[in-house]
Image (cartoon, coloured by chain):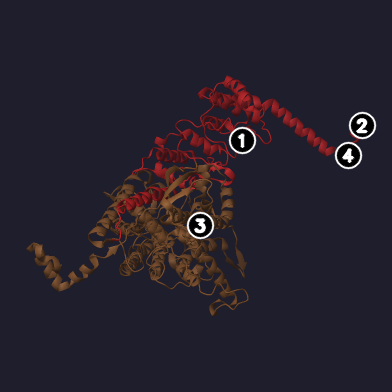
């Protein structure tokens, strides 16, 4: 005892105490906090046994890149602690995860065979249980019929088109990254993308764009997906690039053929 | 027409005689209706532009009935659901009205836009035809200049036209226009404030562009088109080399009835293609782009294709700028805006004169060159096309990157190299191809055409029978002339060159003249005998020494 008290005025002693206190605090927090959060998450995202099922799924299909406890692996996959159920629903539901190959960005593809509503819910519950995060929006929050298309269009033009293009046709970003086209995105996925900010996309949280505004934007984007092209073939709706291509390939070719046809019969000098 | 009134029924003969007595038109028509026009498909390409212009005038007039060239702020209340209640300019609202609420409005808008694209494309292909066949040579240099001016005006006409609807896409173009104007040294700010009537975007630009677009530029274009046509009529059209065609005649069909029927049919074709595109292919869907606000910009914003080369040069340019005495010279804007445009347009305008200066050729030319027979010109043209085409292509580098999954950055890096290397490669390849084609012509003239008939001689040798080329093809090939050179370029080393070829510029001129001019592959050289004095036109197919000469 004397030996310890003798060094209580040692220059390093205050740091040792601080470290001890932080350690104690952290230890006690891990004892108390996770249990309550796990329960909360389980209630928020499904049944309690979903978490256990989700963990199994995670360890089979996700852990090779994201780590056994979703802590992330340097150079392969980021930690999933705190990304929330919305992220899982978006990434797995749109087929982006699990990743087929490492690239600049995960492309949308047909989901893996084991992916269905139940497995997504279980996986989401597990990831939600790790550290909370944004949850999957309700059906009412994303109902396009309840949104205002015109208002949504204005918000869409102000916030989205610099990457996703006027008509959601997608666009290139730097170094092989890109903003995907929005032609296949579901209302829920659009909402989830805004609150989770997948890949190169920034997060549009509720203080930047309110849930109601998000619904307006969803109404606009879904409206675009279903909008017919009154002027004929849409040509990908990307404007002058395909229009110019059609002009030269179709217009000029047709007229050159017509010119050749018209002048096929020539007069010879007598 | 007095000379053939004998069989004309009275109701026609009466009024035409009345008109003839007062207008004296009969004489004029008799002289001009029989004007001969040479036949070649490529001679019709310019008419694409002419007829598109007529469609532009007609559809454009329809659009002016309903378009409101005003930047007054209105709240949209038309039938397009997704913009209801959105604030926009009256111009944009009226363009939406034309698209959705006026009968036939969308079709007219689309035909107008397609006709505009076709107008400029027609001018471009026509210009390339004139360039590659050397049809700009004396006496047609001035008509060539008129063409270059029309092309430049058409680009500006297009820019003012697609800016009018005041949609978000065209607004991006307008912003670049402002950026270019303001980057001009010394006068930039003043010009910008003058053009936009104050701070960008102001409230004047649409109305000003409207006046330019529907009045001034079309008026000037119409005048220039008339001048272009009259000059063509008076100077007569060039003709391709062929049987009986010389610099002193024109072989072809008379204007009336043959050429008129052809031209009329071609007008119908052009109108038809425009109507077809306007009906089945959506163009410039402004309702999807939304109204213009300077704060918004979309991915994949490109100008119409004829402005694409300027977009490309802007995208390729590194972000350089110079600061002098507190003033900024934005090289990253001013160079891409002015240098490629300057190279292309000035190069086009000056080419006939530069060629004349180098070849010393002051003769009149009415027979066109085949592109292969002037390899340097053709190669320079292809280098120009490559330069322009690369810039044009890279104006869409984001769409390329997106469609083909390549890195956007790499399209820029590769483009920065290609824009300098590409034209050189194109030049060399084209030059070699031209010489190759000349050799193939020489081989046909010298040896005839392979007939596909294999003959076995008594001693066992196999030969393929060559037959003389068809008369018209041979005449076409024999239309080749050596490219003139300035006299005196062949001065011996140490000798005294003629007066104009002394000094550094004179020496350069002599060198260029020697390279550019002359006969690269003479038609009959090295092939000794034409099929005419060859016994039955027969040549050994394999192993015969004389055939080696084809590949020299």
- First of labels 2, 4 by sequence position: 2
**Residue neighbourhood size for the residue with mark 2, other residues' Cα within 10 Å, grouped as few (<14), some (14–19), many (≥20):** few
Question: Seen from this angle, which residue lies furthest front?
Answer: B458
Mark 2 lies on residue: A3
Relative to residue A270, is residue A47 depicted above or below? Answer: above
- Judge by depth and name the residue closer to the eye, B105 or B35: B35
Indicate the colour of chain B: brown
Relative to residue B235, is residue A187 depicted above or below? Answer: above
Mark 1 lies on residue: A102
Mark 4 lies on residue: A10
Relative to residue B366, is residue B397 depicted above or below? Answer: above
Residue B36 appears left or right of A29: left
Mark 3 lies on residue: B435
Say which quadrant the N terminus of chain B sits in: bottom left
**Residue neighbourhood size for the residue with mark 1, other residues' Cα within 10 Å, grouped as few (<14), some (14–19), many (≥20):** few
Badge 1 vs badge 3, beta-carbon distance below 8 Å: no
Q: Are marks 4 and 1 on the same chain?
A: yes
Mark 4–mark 3 distance (CA, rounded to whole Å): 93 Å
Q: Chain of mark 1?
A: A
Q: Are marks 1 and 3 on the same chain?
A: no
Q: In which image quadrant can residue B366 be found?
A: bottom left
- Judge by depth and name the residue closer to the eye, B421 or B336: B421
């Amino acid at each position: 005892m004397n030996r310890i008290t003798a060094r209580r005025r040692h220059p390093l002693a205050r740091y040792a105490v601080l470290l001890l206190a932080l350690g104690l605090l952290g230890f006690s927090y891990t004892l108390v906090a996770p249990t309550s959060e796990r329960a909360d998450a389980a209630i928020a995202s499904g049944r309690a046994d979903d978490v256990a099922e989700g963990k199994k799924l995670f360890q089979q299909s996700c852990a090779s890149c994201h780590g056994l406890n979703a802590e992330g692996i340097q150079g392969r996959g980021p930690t999933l602690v705190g990304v929330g159920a919305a992220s899982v629903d978006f990434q797995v539901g749109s087929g982006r995860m699990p990743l087929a190959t490492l690239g600049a960005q995960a492309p949308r593809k047909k989901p893996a065979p084991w992916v269905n509503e139940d497995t997504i819910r279980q996986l989401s519950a597990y990831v939600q249980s790790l550290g909370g995060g944004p949850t999957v929006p309700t059906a009412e929050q994303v109902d396009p019929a309840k949104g205002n298309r015109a208002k949504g269009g204005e918000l869409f033009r102000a916030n989205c088109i610099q990457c996703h293009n006027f008509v959601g046709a997608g666009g290139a970003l730097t170094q092989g990254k890109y903003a995907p086209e929005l032609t296949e995105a579901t209302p829920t996925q659009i909402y989830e993308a805004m609150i989770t900010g997948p890949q190169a996309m920034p997060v549009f949280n509720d203080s930047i764009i309110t849930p109601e505004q998000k619904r307006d934007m969803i109404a606009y984007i879904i409206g675009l997906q279903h909008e017919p092209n009154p002027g004929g073939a849409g040509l990908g709706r990307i404007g002058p690039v395909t229009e110019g291509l059609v002009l030269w390939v179709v217009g000029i070719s047709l007229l050159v053929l017509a010119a050749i046809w018209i002048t096929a019969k020539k007069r010879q000098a007598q | 027409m007095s000379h053939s009134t004998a069989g004309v029924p009275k109701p026609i003969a009466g009024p035409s005689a009345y008109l003839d007595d007062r207008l004296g038109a009969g004489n004029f028509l008799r002289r001009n209706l029989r004007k001969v026009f040479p036949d070649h498909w490529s001679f019709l390409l310019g008419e694409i532009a002419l007829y598109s212009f007529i469609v532009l005038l007609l559809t454009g007039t329809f659009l002016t009935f309903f378009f409101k060239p005003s930047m007054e702020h209105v709240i949209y209340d038309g039938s397009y659901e997704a913009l209801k209640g959105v604030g926009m300019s009256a111009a944009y609202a009226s363009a939406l009205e034309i698209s959705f609420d006026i009968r036939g409005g969308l079709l007219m808008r689309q035909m107008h836009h397609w006709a505009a694209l076709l107008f400029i494309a027609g001018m471009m292909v026509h210009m390339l035809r004139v360039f590659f066949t050397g049809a700009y040579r004396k006496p047609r240099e001035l008509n060539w200049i008129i063409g270059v001016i029309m092309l430049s005006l058409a680009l500006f006409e297009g820019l003012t036209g697609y800016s009018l609807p005041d949609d978000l896409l065209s607004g991006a173009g307008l912003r670049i226009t402002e950026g270019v104007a303001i980057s001009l040294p010394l006068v930039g700010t003043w010009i910008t404030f003058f053009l936009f009537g104050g701070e960008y975007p102001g409230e004047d630009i649409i109305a000003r562009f409207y006046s330019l677009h529907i009045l001034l530029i079309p008026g000037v274009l119409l005048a220039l088109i008339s001048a272009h046509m009259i000059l063509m009529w008076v100077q007569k059209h060039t003709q391709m080399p062929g049987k009986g065609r010389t610099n002193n005649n024109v072989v072809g069909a008379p204007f009336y009835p043959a050429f008129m029927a052809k031209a009329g049919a071609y007008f119908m074709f052009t109108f038809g293609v425009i109507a077809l595109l306007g009906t089945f292919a959506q163009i410039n869907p402004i309702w999807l782009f939304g109204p213009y606000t300077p704060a918004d910009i979309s991915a994949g914003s490109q100008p119409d294709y004829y402005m694409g080369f300027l977009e490309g040069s802007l995208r390729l340019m590194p972000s350089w700028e110079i600061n002098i005495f507190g003033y900024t010279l934005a090289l990253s804007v001013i160079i891409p805006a002015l240098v490629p445009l300057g190279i292309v347009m000035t190069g086009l305008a000056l080419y006939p004169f530069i060629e004349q200066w180098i070849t010393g050729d002051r003769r009149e030319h009415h027979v066109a060159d085949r592109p292969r027979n002037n390899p340097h010109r053709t190669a320079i043209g292809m280098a120009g096309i490559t330069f322009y085409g690369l810039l044009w292509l890279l104006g869409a580098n984001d769409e390329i990157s997106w469609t083909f999954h390549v890195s956007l950055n790499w399209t820029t890096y590769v483009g920065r190299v290609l824009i300098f290397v590409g034209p050189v490669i194109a030049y060399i390849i084209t030059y070699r191809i031209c010489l190759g084609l000349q050799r193939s012509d020489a081989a046909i003239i010298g040896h005839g055409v392979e007939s596909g008939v294999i003959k076995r001689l008594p001693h066992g040798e196999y030969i393929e029978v060559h037959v003389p080329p068809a008369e018209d093809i041979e005449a076409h090939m024999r239309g080749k002339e050596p490219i003139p050179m300035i006299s005196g370029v062949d001065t011996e080393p140490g000798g005294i060159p003629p007066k104009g070829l002394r000094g550094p510029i004179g020496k350069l001129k002599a060198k260029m003249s020697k390279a550019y001019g002359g006969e690269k592959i003479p038609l009959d050289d090295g092939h000794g005998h034409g099929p005419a004095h060859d016994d039955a036109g027969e040549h050994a197919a394999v192993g015969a020494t004389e055939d080696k000469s084809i590949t020299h």
